């Protein structure tokens, strides 16, 4: 049930998109929800909390070590997120509304995993400091209707450049429209990332 999820819902204008805000490791639904207004002030905001705990830190899925994901758990948690979206759409009257997932770090990775696995549910993603989340898992999805924005630091040790390249290759191979914004520096978000994401949203938000 939707009550099983800790989450925020903030209504916006009915002709604006729904921003699904997905926090990073150790953060929460309130921290990431605050970014939504900077990206699209008219949007409805859905901001759930990841249901995995790592040493008391909120996460979306388990990892085996830094940068090494438990891919089976990624797939399981992605399915849970799909279920949350369906329940939230029904509960808040959001059926038919465009949904754009916005994630930071671990939140970007669960958004990207869900976009790769279930493009019928998430076909628009803004991913800050994300990387390839599915290792060697076979994928047969068609992403020709998907549009993905990636913002990364080229010297990010937590989302290595090689993994981002692999992500782009996987998205391209399945037909997604990929927009990549690279900047000097490491993990996180800077003003250039926000500006590029805002421009992407102006072009891709219904």
Image (cartoon, helix red, strand yellow):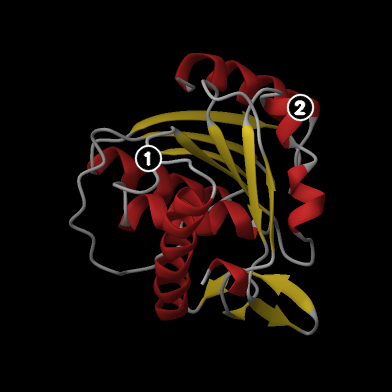
Pick whichever, 195 or 95, lies toward us. 95
In the rendering, which numbered label is found on residue 140?
A: none
Q: Position of residue 6 (x, y in %)?
A: 69, 67
In-image side of 137 versus 186 (left or right):
left
Q: Which residue is mark 1?
A: 123
Badge count: 2
Q: Work out whether 174 lies above or below 139.
A: above
In-image side of 153 versus 126 (left or right):
right
Mark 1 vs 2: CB contact within 8 A? no
Q: Which residue is mark 2?
A: 38
Q: Residue at x 66, y 23 (%)?
A: 42
In-image side of 26 versus 83 (left or right):
right
Pick whichever, 89 or 193, lies toward us. 89
Answer yes or no: is residue 27 visible: yes
Q: Quadrant of the C terminus?
A: top left
Q: Position of residue 85 (x, y in %)?
A: 47, 55
Q: Work out whether 16 lies above or below 104.
A: above
In-image side of 55 versus 142 (left or right):
right
- Determine the CA span between mark 1 and mark 2: 21 Å
Q: Residue at x 44, y 52 (%)?
A: 90
Q: Residue at x 65, y 29 (%)?
A: 12
Answer yes or no: is residue 188 visible: no
Q: Position of residue 115 (x, y in %)?
A: 39, 49
Q: Secondary structure at mark 1?
A: loop
């Amino acid at each position: 049930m939707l009550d099983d999820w800790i989450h925020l819902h903030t209504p916006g204008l009915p002709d604006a998109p729904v921003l699904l805000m997905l926090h990073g490791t150790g953060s929460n639904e309130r921290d990431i929800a605050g970014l939504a207004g900077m990206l699209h002030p008219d949007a409805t905001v859905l901001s759930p909390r990841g249901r995995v705990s790592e040493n008391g830190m909120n996460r979306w899925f388990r990892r085996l070590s830094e940068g090494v994901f438990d891919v089976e758990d990624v797939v399981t948690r992605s399915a849970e997120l799909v279920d949350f979206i369906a329940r939230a759409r029904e509960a808040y009257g959001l059926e038919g509304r465009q949904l754009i997932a916005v994630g930071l770090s671990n939140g970007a990775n669960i958004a990207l995993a869900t976009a790769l696995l279930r493009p019928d549910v998430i076909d628009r993603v803004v991913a800050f400091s994300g990387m390839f989340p599915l290792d060697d898992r076979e994928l047969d999805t068609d992403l020709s209707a998907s549009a993905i924005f990636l913002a990364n630091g080229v010297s990010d040790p937590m989302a290595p450049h090689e993994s981002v390249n692999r992500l782009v290759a996987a998205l391209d191979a399945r037909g997604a429209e990929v927009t990549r914004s690279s900047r000097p520096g490491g993990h996180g978000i800077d003003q250039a990332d926000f500006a590029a994401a805002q421009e992407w949203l102006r072009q891709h938000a219904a």
